[in-house]
């Protein structure tokens, strides 16, 4: 019965129009990585400048 | 792991569980926008209790040099209800709710030349922690309830969060939107 229940549920899952949900976009990693690397570089430079001026 | 150990550590910032942070530092957290005061209240008054009760995990990001709190975010397990066709029941897609996220305005003011700091924290701390959880249990999506403010929705869009179609959005709002997220918009993204 458990197995039947599982198969039933799985079929329900398959039959639904939810591909759009399941295939939702992920985070734009390339873009986020580029922003983050630039941030790290600028942050490092700002900190060096801060220490130099201290 | 000792409480003081960082969960994630980089050259510039490190991330800790909230129970490793002194209360005095937590109380110094500030946000200027009136619509964001709930996030301050959650962090100062409730986050530690929720951490101890395992209702949520709150992470605090500190700058390594100054040891100032730069931001916090809260994650909790959840699911996205998906309506079955011609039925009142639903299935559930496993997810992680990014229940809170805020950059400390006291810290932001010290670094006005870095408006992208939130994007940096999302990329370096939130995504890796969510993905590491998804490596060990079934998690499909990361989702948020965003304040219904156009610039904020656009901002989350740039991070890869999408809105559902209106009918699906209404269904999700009716089933899983907590009271304290009233008026907020459900947005989600796949973790893979």
Image (cartoon, coloured by chain):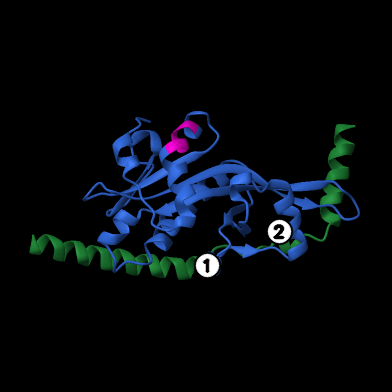
Chain colours: A green, B blue
Counting every numbered tag in the picture gives 2
Q: Residue at x 49, y 56 (%)?
A: B35
Q: Position of residue B95 (x, y in %)?
A: 63, 48
Q: CA distance from mark 1 to mark 2?
A: 17 Å
Chain designation of label 1? A
Q: Position of residue B94 (x, y in %)?
A: 67, 46
In the rendered structure, are the residues bearing label 1 and label 2 in contact, judged by CB atoms less than 8 Å apart?
A: no
Q: Name above or below for residue B67 compared with residue B117.
A: above
Q: Residue at x 30, y 54 (%)?
A: B106
Q: Earlier in the sequence, mark 1 or mark 2?
A: 2
Q: Residues within 10 Å of mark 1 (few under 14, many from 20)?
A: some
Residue B137 or residue B130, whichever sits in front: B130
Residue A45 position by quadrant: bottom left
Q: Which residues are magenta?
A: B45-49
Q: Which residue is mark 1?
A: A28
Furthest residue toward front: B34
Query: Do we see residue B138 in this rendering?
Result: no
What label does residue B161 carry, if any?
Answer: none
- Quadrant of the snapshot with the N terminus of chain B: top left
Residue A27 or residue B163, whichever sits in front: B163
Q: Which residue is mark 2?
A: A22
Chain designation of label 2? A
């Amino acid at each position: 019965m458990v197995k039947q229940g599982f198969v039933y549920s799985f079929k329900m899952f398959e039959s639904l129009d939810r591909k759009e949900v399941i295939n939702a976009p992920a985070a734009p990693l390339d873009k986020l990585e580029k922003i983050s690397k630039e941030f790290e570089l600028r942050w490092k430079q700002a900190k060096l400048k801060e220490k130099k001026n201290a | 792991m000792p409480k003081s150990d960082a969960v994630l550590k980089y050259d510039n910032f490190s991330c800790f569980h909230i129970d490793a942070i002194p209360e005095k530092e937590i109380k110094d957290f500030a946000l200027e926008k009136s619509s964001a005061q709930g996030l301050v209240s959650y962090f100062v008054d409730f986050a530690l209790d929720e951490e101890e009760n395992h209702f949520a995990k709150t992470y605090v990001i500190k700058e390594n040099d100054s040891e100032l709190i730069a931001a916090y975010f809260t994650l909790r397990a959840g699911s996205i209800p998906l309506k079955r066709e011609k039925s009142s029941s639903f299935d559930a897609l496993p997810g992680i709710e990014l229940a809170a996220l805020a950059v400390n305005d006291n810290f932001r003011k010290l670094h006005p030349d870095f408006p992208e700091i939130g994007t940096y924290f999302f990329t370096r701390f939130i995504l890796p922690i969510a993905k590491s959880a998804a490596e060990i249990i079934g998690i499909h999506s990361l989702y948020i309830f965003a304040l219904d403010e156009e610039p904020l929705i656009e901002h989350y869009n740039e991070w890869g969060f999408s809105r559902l179609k209106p009918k699906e959005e209404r269904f999700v709002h009716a089933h899983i939107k907590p009271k304290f997220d009233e008026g907020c918009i459900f947005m989600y993204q796949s973790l893979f």
